[in-house]
Image (cartoon, rainbow, N blue to C red):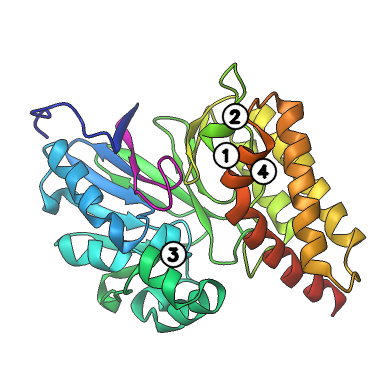
Amino acid sequence: MSSPAAPLPDSLQALGHGVYAIDTGFQRPRFDAAYLLVDQGRAAFVDTGTRHALPRLLGALQALGLPLGAVDWVIPTHVHLDHAGGVGPLMQALPNARLLVHPRGARHMIDPSALYQGALAVYGQAEMERSYGELVGVDAERVQTSTDGMTITLGARTLELIDTPGHALHHHCVWDPVSRGWFTGDTFGISYRELDNPAGEPFVFPASTPVQFQPDALRGSLARLLAREPEVVYLTHYGRLDQVPSLGRQFLRMLDDVVALGRAVRDDPQRHDALCRGLRALYLRSAREHGCRLADSAIDEILAIDIELNAQGMAVWLDREKR
């Protein structure tokens, strides 16, 4: 790999240990990250953002002096479109890359029509066109499925993948022993930089987006991540976080609160509205306790999408519990 000829673009952040965060531009700045790992001139993407992120993904390679053929792996943590919507066009651009995907998500990467229709039902046509665009399938012969505990080689480092259900059944996380960090997708929740307290400490909360939220499985997945004693976690939403044990405790407290809220309003005839109100109150209270100084209206604006989608996911979970 040659040295970059110019300063890195604003969308590309060097995180150390050959790890780079790419702001995919989805929704707003510092909302959605893809990661690029580089070792001895070989590269891998973990998550891709949507298809609209393709210029930034390819631009990251160019900025680092990496040819397209240097990318060995594209690894979506799961197949939700803010993580994997750009997989198809990215794979088309990378001649040597293999796609490594959870076995429950592989068929959706090969034929994304059902994935598109599912997202269309949640977001509607206008939002699909604005935020996600057309989905592109990947040739089946270029797709490899992960197994729990499998390892792959990238340059001189060995990455490990583990099965991490709870946010989605098709979710795996990637362990990087060089940085001692997990690429967590949505398993370690969401942490927006705008909600950091004045000391720069992050605020994290679980993501229960439709349709496979399972709190007990999520607790188990988090326990597996923490058992490795990671020094950092790399969240898709958003960025590299340290102080992982304290964040894990914060996450589990929030998960307990989310579960208690759901069960308290399970039979409310206006359940969706009750879930949205309850989540808003929970997030505001917790952000204030954390030391976030933003006005309530600013926090509402930042979390509006999450409140709506997390409430929808909680409803699916509550209905599943009834059966």
Magenta span contains residue 155: no
User: In the structure shown, which secondary structural element does the residue marked by tag 2 occupy?
Assistant: loop
Q: Which residues are magenta?
A: 16-34
Residue 168 at x, y percent in the picture: 59, 63
Q: Determine whether, in the image, residue 209 is placed left or right of residue 151.
A: right
* Residue indicated by mark 3: 81
Residue 202, labelled with which disc?
A: 2
Magenta span contains residue 30: yes
Q: CA distance from mark 2 to mark 3?
A: 25 Å
| Depth check, front residue: 63 or 134 | 134
| Quadrant of the drawing holding the N terminus | top left
* Residue indicated by mark 4: 205
Which mark is first along the chain, 1 or 3?
Answer: 3
Residue 43 at x, y percent in the picture: 24, 45
Can you say whether 289 is above or below 109 in the image? Answer: above
CB atoms of marks 3 and 4 within 8 Å:
no
Picture residue at 70% right of the left edge, 33% below the top: 287
Disc 3 residue crowd, few under 14, some 14–19, many 20+, Cα 10 Å: many
CB atoms of marks 1 and 4 within 8 Å:
yes
* Residue indicated by mark 1: 191
Q: CA distance from mark 3 to mark 1?
A: 18 Å
Picture residue at 61% right of the left edge, 52% below the top: 304
Which mark is first along the chain, 4 or 3?
Answer: 3
| Depth check, front residue: 49 or 151 | 49
CB atoms of marks 1 and 2 within 8 Å:
yes
Q: Determine whether, in the image, residue 289 is placed left or right of residue 165.
A: right
